[in-house]
Image (spheres, grey):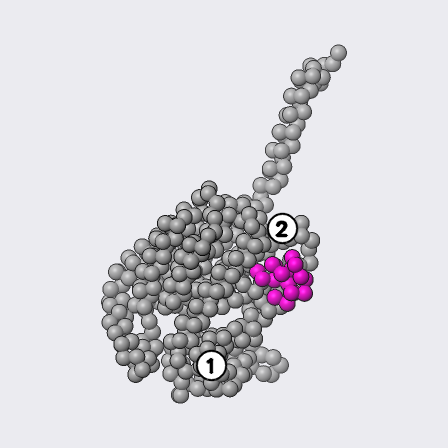
Amino acid sequence: MLWILILILIVWSGYLGFSYFFVNPAILSMLAPVYPKATQLFKLIEFGSTHRDVMLAVWLAIILILILFQLIVFLSKKEIKINKAKILILTVILGIAALSYPVFSNDIFNYLFGAKTVVYYHENPFLVMPKTHLGDDLWLRFTNNIDNTYYYVGQTPITYFYGPVFLVYTLIPFLFFGAVEFQKLFLGYKLLGVILFLATGYLFKKINPKDRLVWAYWFLNPFLILELLTNSHNDLVMIFLFVLSIYWWQRNKILGWSAFVLSVLTKWVSGGLGLVFLFKEKYRYLIFKILGILILFFHAFEQKQAWYYSWIYMVFPFAKLKKSSWFILITWQSILLLNYSKFIWFNTWVDWPILGIIKWIVPILVLFNEFGRIRAGRGVEMVDKHRSERCEETRRGSSPLHGTD
């Protein structure tokens, strides 16, 4: 296992360098007056944009190797024992991945500007559009969705998409670095995610110490590392708080409910998962399983973004899934990673029509794999039981087919 971690560390280090071929030029222009050496990255951007074939080859090599290592860990029959060396290397892996540039998403810039609105402009981002500061703030040159109204409360337009708990979370880097030095806030926010990622995996192991697959589906999952740490999607905060609520629920109901409410106030989508707390412990794994499959069907119907599939990690780790179901999910998420190849090649989003079909196949396969053979399995069990009884009767000479004395 140790050699696998070292090789994964090398691969993610390669991705760290690869990612900065895709930096937004507006960021470099903003940093150049203070950090003149930042302008050297313009050469990387130029090379990346004119050598798409090289970029695609490197991307495919990195992702395929990471997927291969994940499958090796997944298929391994040996239990992975945790020690200080493994935890240290894992932390370095996640830290390097987190420091990579978010090639496939600009959401982190929206997160940071929402916090800057509070700290620097002393305004409420729920009520003030970022566009208000378009003429004065250089951050808005690379921040998306600066003029959106997401919903209304009465007649009041709400211009911040996430919950108040997440807004408070994004303020943490500002407490250490102020509200001006973008690069420190950017990297500080990303490294903060490493803590949550490790803590979430730790909670998985504490809740279910016998879970031997947590290294494959969480700690070394390239899909989750890319989406939650490299692309820095805030779903990680919601997932952590929900998993924390499950952990606390087993020990203190008040703390459990509190963490659950915080998760909902991060992103509303975890609200429906509160259903699990209404069932007894012996039925809860079944509810987790059903909710996870419903999430898969919801994504298939709504055609949501790839990183929204991280939501299943709020439920499936507690659902006693068959290993074959985990294999289906890991295969699907590997396909989603490979789908990003289109962006590397075309520098824009192009959908493969086949993905729309696979999105429906995945939940159907998991549903059938978990539930479809229950009745058939019971039938086989009854047949075996009946055969055993017949054999016993025959041995005793009391079978109806042979008569009795």
As helix, strand or loop, the secondary structure at mark 2 comes to helix
Asked whether residue 52 is drawn in magenta, I would say no
Give the residue displayed 38% in from the left and 67% down from the top. 99
Q: Residue at x 40, y 57 (%)?
A: 89
Q: Nearer the viewer, mark 2 or mark 1?
A: 1
Instruction: Please determine whether, in this image, residue 340 is positioned above or below residue 128.
Output: above
Label 1 environment density (alpha carbons within 10 Å; few <14, some 14–19, many ≥20): many
Disc 2 packing (10 Å; few <14; some 14–19; many ≥20): some
Q: Which residue is mark 2?
A: 286
User: Residue drawn at (58%, 62%), measured in percent from left and top?
Assistant: 244
Question: Where is residue 154 shown, x and y percent of the image?
Answer: 62, 81
Secondary structure found at label 1: helix
User: Label 1 amino acid?
Assistant: Lys
Between 204 and 300, the one lying in front of the other is 204
Q: Is residue 30 above or below residue 337?
A: below
Residue lying at 24% horizontally and 71% vertically, measured from the top left: 43
Give the image quarter of residue 98. bottom left
